[in-house]
Image: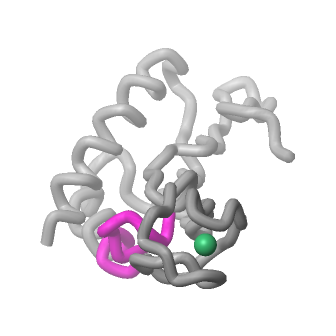
């Protein structure tokens, strides 16, 4: 279950960010995970619960946003999205394709409660 080590390195980044906000309380971690990455969101959620249990991040919510796989075909020039990783172009069947999105694992946003009571977010909400 490589989700455990992925989760651990994600939490290292989160911890560094939280160190810049002393006294703040982390509420939610929002992740973008591409459907083409090898990460199972359910396993990542389980790993997160195991790692954070009893620690400073216990009870923090993990929100996972699945990113569809997007690519284009060099043979026919079409762009497309997949729900699962595929090896060929859905239009012409060529394997000469470029995958442009859907492989990512990004921390999109951290929702933090500042000690003064005002809420600051890691990034603007869209
Ligand atoms: Zn094609």
> Picture quarter containing residue 13?
top left
Which colouring convention does the figure follow?
A: one colour
Would you place residue 93 above or below residue 33 in this image?
below
Instruction: Magenta stretch: give its range.
Output: 34-45
Residue 31 can be seen, yes or no: no
- Where is residue 87? Give x, y as percent: 40, 77
Would you place residue 19 above or below residue 87 in this image?
above
Residue drawn at x 41%, y 36% as measured from the top left: 14
Residue drawn at x 22%, y 59% as measured from the top left: 51
Number of numbered tags placed on the structure image: 0
Residue 18 shown left or right of residue 114 in the figure: left
Residue 91 shown left or right of residue 88 in the figure: right
Position of the N terminus by quadrant: bottom left
Residue 23 shown left or right of residue 53 in the figure: right
Residue drawn at x 33%, y 43% as measured from the top left: 11
* Magenta stretch: includes residue 41: yes
Residue drawn at x 30%, y 68% as measured from the top left: 38
- Where is residue 88? Give x, y as percent: 46, 78
- Where is residue 105? Give x, y as percent: 44, 51
């Amino acid at each position: 279950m490589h989700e455990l080590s992925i989760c651990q390195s994600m939490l290292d980044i989160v911890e560094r960010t939280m160190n810049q906000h002393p006294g703040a309380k982390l509420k939610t971690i929002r992740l973008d995970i591409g459907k083409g990455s090898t990460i199972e969101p359910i396993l990542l959620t389980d790993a997160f619960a195991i790692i954070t249990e009893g620690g400073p991040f216990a009870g923090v919510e993990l929100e996972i946003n699945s990113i569809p796989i997007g690519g284009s075909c060099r043979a026919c020039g079409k762009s497309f999205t997949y729900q699962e990783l595929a090896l060929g172009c859905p239009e012409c069947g060529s394997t000469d394709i470029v995958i442009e999105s859907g492989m990512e694992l990004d921390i999109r946003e951290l929702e933090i409660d500042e000690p003064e009571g005002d809420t600051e977010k890691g990034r603007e909400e869209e």
